[in-house]
Amino acid sequence: YDLKLKSGYVSSEASGWVKYTGQIDINSEHYKSLKIKSGLIFYIPDKHQVIQKNGNRYIQAYLFNLTDTIVSIPRSDATIGNVENWLLVNNNWKKIKENTKATCGNSYWTQKLEPNYYISIQFENYDISLGNKKVKHKIKINVGGQMLESKEVWAKLYENQFKLLTKK
């Protein structure tokens, strides 16, 4: 697979795995580091890269519900729905990944996120985290008709990946 990546391959599938849901702790480092403490907040911490024992790589993110209403989160099995990954290539943002459709209609469901609760999500980024060419990366999720955009983080592309993305 690594040779495939070095030759220029970038997966077009975006996956955000829901790890857990919990009540917001106002004394937590994540809560304290939020610039805005109201509304629906899509947050990626500074130390966001997760590397599993098996080598899989993820961007750790959180979705905070700091509203006074229940928010409906689109789900497909263990993943969050309506995810897009964007890279800044030659000063243009390009959508490079999005959710794929499930093969079974029973996979789709809606999770309710109560006020003052959050979801921990890990977004796969193995294929865009191993090269030497740094490019800006952001993730977008559509929740309740609202497009939420993450802060910019760094993707690390192989040279051939970057070259192929500039041609698209």
Image: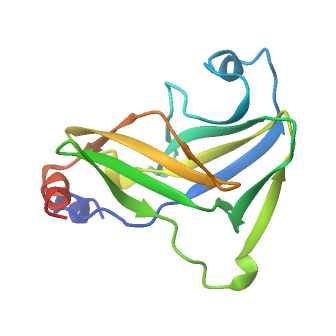
Q: Which residue occupies the foreground of this view, 46 or 116?
A: 116
**Image position, residue 9 (x, y; %):** 25, 64
- Is residue 84 toward the left or the right of residue 95 in the image? right
> Is residue 168 rendered to the left or right of residue 65?
left
Q: Position of residue 131 (x, y in %)?
A: 23, 44
- On the image, the x and y values in percent for residue 82 come to 58, 61
Say which of 108 and 70 sits in front.
70
Query: Residue sitting at 81 percent across and 35 percent down?
Result: 67
In the image, residue 79 sits, relative to residue 28, either above or below, namely: below
Quarter occupied by the C terminus: bottom left
**In this view, 5 is above or below 128:** below
Question: In the rendered image, which quarter contains the N terminus?
Answer: bottom left
Q: Residue at x 20, y 58 (%)?
A: 165
Q: Is residue 134 left or right of residue 96?
A: left
Q: Residue at x 63, y 46 (%)?
A: 121
Figure quadrant of residue 7? bottom left
Numbered marks: total: 0
User: 118 and 1: which one is in front?
Assistant: 118
Q: Name the residue located 61 percent from the left edge and 84 percent from the top edge.
A: 103
Compare residues 111 and 156 and report the one nearer the observer: 111
